[in-house]
Structures are given as C-alpha cells and as structure tokens.
Image (spheres, helix red, strand yellow):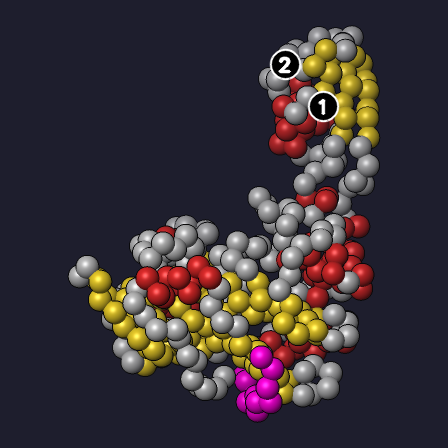
Amino acid sequence: MVEALPVPQGEGADEPEFESAEESAAETVEDAVEERSADVPAEGHGQRLDRWLVGLAPEFSRNHLQGLIERGCVWVNGQLARGASQRLQAGQRLRVQLQPTAESQAFRAEALPLQIVFEDEHLLVLNKVAGMVVHPAAGNWSGTLMNGLLAHHRAAAALPRAGIVHRLDKDTSGLMVVGKSLEAVTALSRMIAAREVHREYLALAQGRVADELFIDAPLRRDPVSRVKMAVLAGGKPARTDVYCLDRVELDGRQYSAVHCVLHSGRTHQIRVHLASRGHPLVADGLYGGSPAFGLQRQALHAARLSLNHPISGMALRFDASLPQDLSDSWAAAGLPPPVLQDRGG
C-alpha cells in the first residue's frame, strides 16, 4: 500500500559512511582457482603441512588453508595430504589448488526471490522474509539481500553496499528501503541519520505490557556476550514507543501484541528495550524469550515504513501485513489480526 502521509522531521545524527559493493569485491582475491607447486626445502623438514603452506600462499589465512587440506585440494608427492598436522620431509613435492575464500565470492550477484512492493529508478522498497541475512558476513557469505540486489539491477554493483542503507535482523521480517541511484543512497543515508525515515513494528511480547510504554534507554554492546546488546550507561541514545494492541492469557502465562515506533535504529533495539522491561519477544531466545505458538524465530515484523521520496519529495507510506508464520501465531494465541493506528514518527 502506498498513500500520501505527511512525514515529520526527526532529530539529527551522524551520517553513515559506506563502501561500494564493487570496491569491496575488488579488495578480495581473484575468483579463479590457482594451482601452486613447490619442493620442501631443508628448513621445511619436520614442519606441519598447514604451517608451511602459509609461506607458500601468504595471502590466505591458515584456517582457509586447513580447509583446503580437508577438502582434498593439497597433494604431497602426488598423494592427497593426510591432514593439516602432517609432518613434511625435505625434497617432497607439494601441490595445492588455491580455491577462493567464501569472503571473496560474497559480492556476487545471485538471483533470489525478492518481495518488491515499490520500485522506480531511484528507490526500491521490499518486504524481507525472515531468515534472509541483509549483508554478507561470517557464516552467511551467500544468499543475502545484497547478493539478490546485485542480480536485480546492474547499477547496484557501483553503489555503497548495493544501495542498502539500513538493516533488519536475520530473523526479523518486514519492510526495508533501498537506494537504486547514488543520489538516492546519499539522500536516504542522510534522512535516516536525521530520523526522517520512520519505521514501525508489530511484535508478540511476553507478559502484560502497559497500554503505553515509552522506553528511553541507551544501548551498547553487552560486555559479557558480544552477540548481544544491552541497556547500559554510556551507550548510544535509543527510544522506543510501545503501544499495546491486545492481551491474552494462556496456561497461566500472559502475552501482549504490541505496536512499536522507533525513534532511533540501534541494533536489536526493540528486542533489548522490551526485554529490559521484563517483556522479551516470544521465541527470542537470545534475550530470554520462550518458544510459543509454534514460532521458530523472534516475533517481530517491520510492518510500516514512512518517508519522503529522496528525489521527488513525495510522501510515501508502505504497510506490510504479517507473514504466514506470525499470522499463524497470532491466531494460535487467539488474538485478532493486528491493526496499526497512526502514531506518527
């Protein structure tokens, strides 16, 4: 859905800096498989195979070279290497196929199904599915939104991060805006920094959430668990407005359907803010949420996106209904389909 909607101004913030996908790819090794051979010198006698290979191919990490040994890409005197710890003898002939690292292939175009809800020459709005990673990173070097965008339009390769200007967690579904031209990416980055792109979410939280809950608490990386964020002094300012839509009690436990309005866009913001008030999201194990209603991921969906078009200035608003898994969980909880009220940004 796209409709006219006045978008209020937000507070200022630092503007993010990006590298283009093309520049990032240029910094990696060549994708072609290279083969190298060498004889073990006298000083290499008795060394571990993996340690000696680091000298033969110093541009690769020892961990990657160990992986090549395990995959059968290394031969000693014409025989497959027995393992990374194999001890070498002077005069042995080594041959290695230097397969590219996963990182070096991360910025490749992949034809992926993208749920596009709006597109013109400057702008693309999509409904990200749960389970899709936004940017390539360790453990997810392919199948990401960036890979899909590189396949969707050729100009993405020359744009900062293929035009991506904000993120959603892997297991959060919903609306994202992407720039398709450098002019739009630059404008969108500034708009996001100035809080002029407004994002609203639907979630299922544990416990009885108050009718209105305004959380203004700084967030920073958890010093104990680096995969988590935490409400801590000295963190970056973060504010979330929470409005309870419905409540239900099942088997002695209470649950609340909530509408969350972001005033900042910190990592895991809604998840951490609600958990800090004793209301972790259903199935959000990282922050203490318990499984319920058949959900396999945190019950969080980016349901509304509002902004002025970065080029034309036209006011836009997009709504995305719950995906099937969340719709099923709402029904399993006995909750009516959620209806977003106009709360502003």
- 153 up-or-down from 342: above or below: above
Q: Which residue is mark 1?
A: 73
Q: What residue span does the magenta drawing correspond to?
A: 1-11
Name the spot of residue 270 as percent of width and height, x first: 42, 68
Instruction: Name the residue type under label 1.
Output: Cys
Q: Quadrant of residue 255?
A: bottom left
Does 51 lie within the magenta span? no
Name the spot of residue 104 as percent of width and height, x first: 72, 44
Of residues 86 and 158, which is closer to you in this image? 158
- 10 up-or-down from 50: above or below: below
Q: Is residue 247 visible?
A: yes
Name the spot of residue 65 as percent of width and height, x first: 67, 28
Of residues 296 and 313, which is closer to you in this image? 296
- 117 up-or-down from 284: above or below: below
Dominant secondary-structure state across the stretch colored magenta: loop
For the residues labelled 1 and 2, the Cα–Cα distance comes to: 11 Å
Q: Is residue 213 visible?
A: no
Q: Which residue is mark 2?
A: 82
Query: Element type at marker 1?
Result: loop
Q: Is residue 104 left or right of residue 339?
A: right
Query: Element type at marker 2?
Result: loop
Residue displayed at 71% across by 53% down: 111
Q: Is residue 234 left or right of residue 312?
A: left
